[in-house]
Image (cartoon, helix red, strand yellow):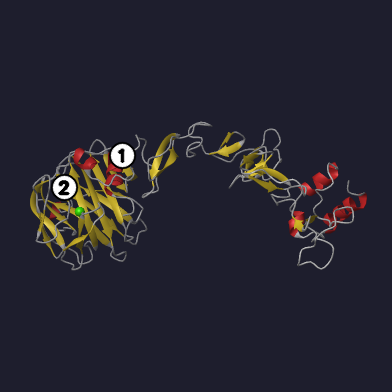
Amino acid sequence: MRSGPKLVHTGLGLLLGLCIPACAAQPATTTQASSGSSSTGDTSVVPTTDGPTPDLPSDTTGESCPPDRAMCGSWCANLNSDPDHCGTCDSPCPDDTVCMQGTCAPDCGDLTACDGGCFNTAVDPTHCGSCGNLCPAGEVCAQGTCTPGCGDGQTICGGACSDIFHDPQNCGNCGETCPPPPNNGEAACIVPGTCTFKCLQFNHPAPPLDPVDCEACTDDPVLAAGPIHYWRFSEQNGSVAIDDIGGADATYLDVTLDQEGVLAPNDRAALFGTAETSEARIDSMSFPATAVTVEVVVRIDDAEQPVHPFISVASGNGSEANEFLFYHRVGDEGNQGLRLIVAQTHEWRTALRVDDGNWHHLAASWSNDNGATIYVDGQRMAHQPTLGDAQSITAMATVIFGQEQDLLGGGFDPTQYLKGALDSLVIFDRVLTDQEVFVHATSVMCSGS
Ligand SMILES: [Ca+2]
């Protein structure tokens, strides 16, 4: 047994703040000392004549160890953390354990070892903030502090607070753990407590659906969805933008071909906007009149340009110049981002800008029954069910990529042309579902692109 004066010394050291910080951070010392359970455990005092005659470490000049160490043979050991001398000089810890506060404990990594187990002290009500800190009945542990209840939108799950509408460990109900995600994805939970996943190239949850391959790198799902037009902009030379599906080939003007695309490995893209006359056009083609979805893979390179048109559909005369217009606009009114105009006067907007120099999968759909929806990287960003009176798009049209028609086939504004690249543009004569758009975006936007 250690003598009484040493225990007193320890206590005084703590009370007077004489311990170095490592000592103050080791409350187990006091517990062990007060228990009187062994001849050691008091790590803040120097060894004295009741211990073995020490072989002093070379960097000490007296017959003592620093205040936070104990003399174990020839070694000044920290009995709180030394796995070879854990708690006492002759108590080595087994393999796969560490010495925590003088006790051998499992190696818990990011968690905290308490009572022989591993705990997340940020949320665990039995070890809240620190080992052994038991929250009172009715309280929960949040951010390492016992609190009377969870905040708004939080539910008590196992004594911890959880947002069961977004927590993949407690999705919909406590303990409902979401299944493993696909490769290049992570589990996610969305309102109203439905498991899904994120593909990491987008970092937002998919609509609820069976997991898809987040590393798909194919446009097979696009083709399977039955498009009526598909321009890949993958030509390496010439002036023709081939429509793989509908035969409505477009004519390039002042476009730089054979740029790197996103659909690896051999996909190419077309760079628009090196001249303000840059465009690709089809003088006359049949455009869907009552239900349409356009998907475009585009990179906008100039955030100063106020308007970047992707597709402009005009019919008749100048009064029908905006039959269908999908474009990006940065205006003075604060509402900046993507816009869709249908039948001249009906307009929908997102507030999200995508003129960041990165590739994006953008989509816009419309029908009288479904209204209009705009997607960014597979995620629904804006939707309005309907705008009242039924509309239709004049079917026979001039379609231009990269310019905005104020007159049929012309009337271009020198500040309203696409400065960026088109990788693909696909047209469907129906409204795609959220799931379809997400799968298409995930599939063609290959990870790392
Ligand atoms: Ca392409």
Q: Nearer the viewer, residue 165 or 370?
A: 165
Is the C-beta of the residue carrying label 1 under 8 Å from the nearest atom of ligand 1? no
Quarter of the figure with the C terminus: bottom left
Is 319 placed left or right of 170 in the picture? left
Residue at image coords 75%, 51%: 79
Residue at image coords 28%, 45%: 443
Residue 185 position in % (x across, y down): 39, 44
Question: Mark 1 Cα within 10 Å, few/some/many (few <14, many 20+)?
Answer: some
Residue 408 position in % (x across, y down): 11, 56
The residue type indicated by label 2 comes to Tyr
Which residue corresponds to mark 2?
230
Q: Which image quarter: residue 105?
A: top right
Which residue corresponds to mark 1?
434
Question: Mark 2 Cα within 10 Å, few/some/many (few <14, many 20+)?
Answer: many
Residue at image coords 28%, 63%: 301
Is 442 placed left or right of 251 in the picture? right
Q: Which image quarter: residue 405?
A: bottom left
Which mark's residue is nearer the viewer, 1 or 2?
2
Q: Nearer the viewer, residue 402 or 84?
A: 84
Q: Is residue 260 visible?
A: yes
Q: Is residue 386 visible?
A: no
Decide which of tag 1 and tag 2 comes sooner along the chain.
Answer: 2
Residue 300 position in % (x across, y down): 28, 60
Looking at the image, is 377 positioned above or below residue 118? below
The residue type indicated by label 1 comes to Asp
Residue 256 position in % (x across, y down): 17, 64
Q: CA distance from mark 1 to mark 2?
A: 20 Å
Q: Secondary structure at mark 2?
A: strand
Task: Name, please, the residue furthest toward the right.
Answer: 4
